[in-house]
Image (spheres, grey):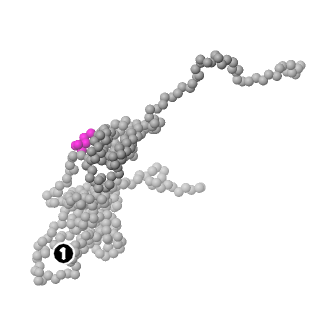
Amino acid sequence: MRGLQLLARPAIRGYASTARPYVPPAQLANVAPASAPQKPRPESPSFFTVRPAYYDQLYELNQALSLSRRALRSQCLLPLPPFARDALRPMPSMWRTRGDLSDVMSTPLSNTRYKSITSVLDQLHECRRIAWTAGSLELAVGISDVLTSFEHRNLDAVTNRKRKERPLDEHGRSYTVGRRKTSSARVWMIPVQHDASASTSAPASETVAPPPTPAQASVNNDIDALFGSSADRTSEPASTALAAAPILSSPAQSAPPVKLAEVLVNNIPIHEYFQNPTDRARIVRPLTLTGSLPAYNIFAIVRGGGLSGQSGAIAHAISKGIVVHDARQEIKDILKKAKLLRRDPRMVERKKTGLEKARKRRAWVRR
């Protein structure tokens, strides 16, 4: 009976979806189609970055730089030959510090981002110098308006201040401080005293000229005092000996004998404190570059770090002491080109958690 009832039912298939009622097209003529709500378009292309304020400022500065260079090229002012660049009008620039620039841009700046901003500002400042020198005042004023908010608050006071000079004391000594890594050195330098009485003590008829000249003998004594005896220096490499050799005078010139130049480190001779020839060559490098190896008596007190850092700290202090005694521009240029007048910013990288050292990892073992 149940089977007959199933056979009597019409075969209609049901669907889960509801049937949509039919609407004639004439009724939909004046009905606006339903559209999805659109999101407002961001004002800045860097809206979705982590620091939109920073990238907006950097983008605007790059745009100003490209427009300035295009204007200078249109006036045939770029690229400049070297002689024309040397004749540009000197215009000192000093940018805000990283903290002040972070407040101006309303976003924290790391050292890398601060350098990126200042590098673009330096290029804009160079374009301003070219425009001022060439007489393109409209372009120079426009660039100055862009750079005003990034310049130091007291620009005139900062650029016109004079560097403090380190005077000599009543004994003619200079006192300088040098640093390297975690080491610091205090160095006193005093010029050697020329002894004129020794050259006139013996009569000219009784003087017997030794095989080496007086200048050569005094320099050899100075080198022996600085680096030890000649027997100790036989094992040193030739490059180190050449780097430590002073500028010698010709044998025909007669130089008056001078007192022995000494280098004492913590009241110990240098060849006993620093037994590595590389450390000794690093210390006397400022003296050899300027040709004043036997010209000063040097007394250093060094603390902290190892022998490599201590030798670098002493060399830094000696370089500054040479400039105090001899303020000629060529001496400064020699030491500045050798990067001896500034502290070496390199430091030892710290040890990391889970590693053997700063970057050394443990060996991977299968079992």
Which residue is drawn at the image coordinates 25% and 70% (left, top)? Answer: 247
Q: Secondary structure at mark 1?
A: loop
Which residue is drawn at the image coordinates 16% and 57% (left, top)? Answer: 169
Look at the image and tell me whether residue 292 can be seen. Answer: yes
Residue 251 higher or lower than 351, as above or below: below
Q: Residues within 10 Å of mark 1 (few under 14, many from 20)?
A: few
Q: Amino acid at mark 1?
A: Gln
Q: Nearer the viewer, residue 230 or 338?
A: 338
Asked if the magenta segment contains residue 156, the reply would be: yes
Which residue is drawn at the image coordinates 25% and 42% (left, top)? Answer: 155
Q: Nearer the viewer, residue 174 or 117?
A: 117
Residue 318, quarter of the rendered image: bottom left
Q: Position of residue 196 (x, y in %)?
A: 12, 71
Residue 205 higher or lower than 96, as above or below: below
* Side of 110 where 132 appears, left or right: left
Look at the image and tell me whether residue 94 can be seen. Answer: no
- Residue annotated with mark 1: 253
Which quadrant, please, contains the N terminus? top right
Q: Position of residue 221 (x, y in %)?
A: 23, 73
Which residue is drawn at the image coordinates 59% and 55% (left, top)? Answer: 367
Magenta part of the chain: 151-158
Q: Position of residue 206 (x, y in %)?
A: 12, 83
**Numbered-mark total:** 1
Residue 122 higher or lower than 105, as above or below: below
Asked if the magenta segment contains residue 239, the reply would be: no
Residue 241, quarter of the rendered image: bottom left
Q: Position of residue 352 (x, y in %)?
A: 45, 50
* Side of 105 where 222 appears, left or right: left
Residue 121, quarter of the rendered image: top left
